[in-house]
Image (cartoon, helix red, strand yellow):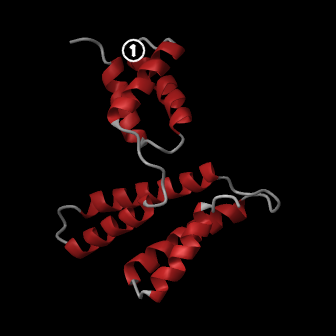
Amino acid sequence: MSEPTILERIQKDLAAAMKERDADTTSTLRMLKAALMEAKTRKAKDEAMGADEEIAVLRRYVKQRRETLESLKGKGDAALEAREEREITVTERYLPAAMGDDELASLVEQAIAKTGAAGPKDMGRVIGAVMAQVKGRADGNAVSRIVKAKLAPPA
């Protein structure tokens, strides 16, 4: 038997959360399921959605939640901030383990050597090469930060 898709895992966990009357988890899982179903319907009817595409949908969801969380900071609404943080935590259960900075820095160095990047003007090529390799296991901001540091002119 093949490993269940992220959508199948979410549906199973949604049923369990509903039985446990866990309103926060139920709400988040319903939103994730809806986002995945919407992405699936945008594809051709006979074309299945792959794991990479499911991961991309969830990464976008986490990114949106983090942006919302940042906009809430300093506005004094701790309840909304806590809800956003819970949604991020629940969503991250379905994502592959994130790469550490050391592993990411190694990939960046390889990409710099492979692309022949020489300075900040080559950042886009390096970031593109690294993002193609990490396949959802690293945040674009982290990749950008490391690439920027590696390509910065010496002080």
Q: Decide: is 51 above or below 93.
A: above
- Residue 110 percent across, percent down from the top left: 47, 19
Q: Position of residue 10 (x, y in %)?
A: 54, 70
Q: Mark 1 Cα within 10 Å, few/some/many (few <14, many 20+)?
A: some
Which SS class for mark 1? Answer: loop
Residue reaching furthest front? 1
Tell me: residue 138, above or below residue 85.
above
Q: Quadrant of the C terminus?
A: top left
Picture quadrant of residue 46: bottom right
Residue plotted at (78% across, 56% down): 47
Q: How many marks?
A: 1
Task: From this view, report whether residue 43 is shown above or below residue 122.
Answer: below
Left or right, 103 with reference to 96: left
Please tell me in which quadrant of the rendered image residue 66 appears: bottom left
Please provide percent x and percent y for residue 29: 49, 73
Q: Is residue 74 left or right of residue 132?
A: left
| Residue at 54% in and 82% down | 15
Amino acid type of disc 1?
A: Gly
Q: Residue 149 at what x, y percent from top left?
A: 30, 24
Residue at 40% from the left image edge and 40% from the top image edge = 99
Residue found at the far right of this picture: 46
Closest to the observer, 138 or 8:
8
Say which residue label 1 marks: 119
Residue occupying image coordinates x 64% and y 61%: 39
In this rendering, the answer to whether 138 lies above or below 90 is: above
**Image quarter hosting the N terminus:** bottom right
